[in-house]
Amino acid sequence: MATEFSSITLPLDPGPALYLVATPIGNLEDITLRALRVLKGVDLIACEDTRQTQKLLNHYGITTRTISYHEHNEMTKAAELVVDLEGGAKIALVTDAGMPGISDPGFRLTSLAIRHQVPVIPIPGASAFLAALVASGLPTDSFRFSGFLPAKRGERRTLLESVSNSPRTQVFYEAPHRVLEALQDVIEVLGPERHVVVAREVTKLHEEFLRGRAAEILETLRSRGNVKGEITLLLAKADETTSQPLTDARASVRQRVSQIMSEEKVDEKAALKKVAKELGVSKSEAYRELQRSK
């Protein structure tokens, strides 16, 4: 539906409220005129990292006072800021990049402000996972964003198993030093043919999209040595050709354990230990696959 922009009247200065302001994820030009107006007009800007935000403010000549608001102090800072908001203060919340509250601090302050009936106003803008999604080439009609993949391998594989047959595109953030391990898990859990996209340094100078089968992308990144930059990992939805590997793996674990027990006359525990070594996985992972197949 078309919008009649000429009929929209914006106030010259923001009123008392908590403003959730999206900031650029790389390119400093990716900020809205409205966001700049709000950052200039509020009484205070609460920042995930004041040093990072100051670069943006200096670039646009904004002199508004800043304070630190991050995951380590938000328990106490949120309450303090709400007291100020109830007193009529105009406060903007920003993170280092992107939208506050998306894999960044913001939820606690937002929910507390709402409980105290303080107006909460979103100022939309750049978002890394949305930018990566729309340029990925994967379906955007149905997707799920799940933040960062778990750092621990067992938890990461369990999460991947839970989406192995998902009918929607899966979107995750991942640390550059873990992306190779994550892709290896994708291959082992979802299969080497699962289509993936690695979006790296989106909107920045060295922006890159790697699109292809999981095994191909892993080989490409391995050949480079260290992977650097902000990473968004996208997984294509399951289809008939990509939903089989996990089922096959479970069946093979069960069959191989039975085979070893029969041929070598050992108990299940000893057989499972050998199968785990053959598959290159931990004994606990092999045990989980065995239990699921029963």
Image (cartoon, rainbow, N blue to C red):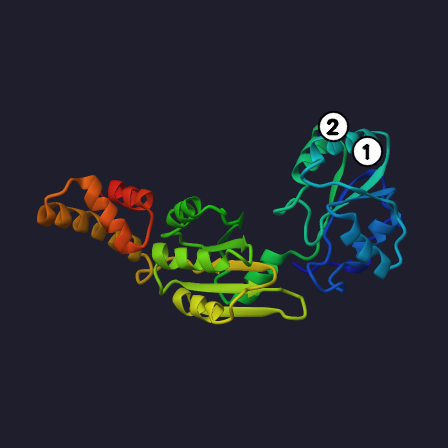
The mark total stands at: 2
The answer to whether one can see residue 10 in this image is no
Pick the front one: 124 or 65 = 65
Pick the front one: 264 or 108 = 264
Question: Which residue carries the number 2 mark?
Answer: 116
- The location of residue 214, given as percent across then percent down, is 41, 64
From what the image shows, is residue 218 above or below residue 118?
Answer: below
Q: What element carries label 1?
A: helix
Indicate left or right for 177 with 91 as reference.
left
Amino acid type indicated by mark 2:
His
User: Which comes before the other along the chain, label 1 or label 2?
Assistant: 1
- The location of residue 150, given as percent across then percent down, is 49, 46
Q: Which residue is drawn at 42% across and 46% down?
A: 159
- The location of residue 151, given as percent across then percent down, is 50, 47
- The location of residue 207, given as percent across then percent down, is 62, 69
Please state, as top left, top right, bottom left or bottom right, where the N terminus lies in the image: bottom right
Are discs 1 and 2 less than 8 Å apart at CB?
yes
Q: Indicate the quadrant where residue 32 lies.
A: bottom right
**Residue 127: which numbered mark, if any?**
none
Q: Residue at x 60, y 59 (%)?
A: 230
**Residue 85: which numbered mark, if any?**
1
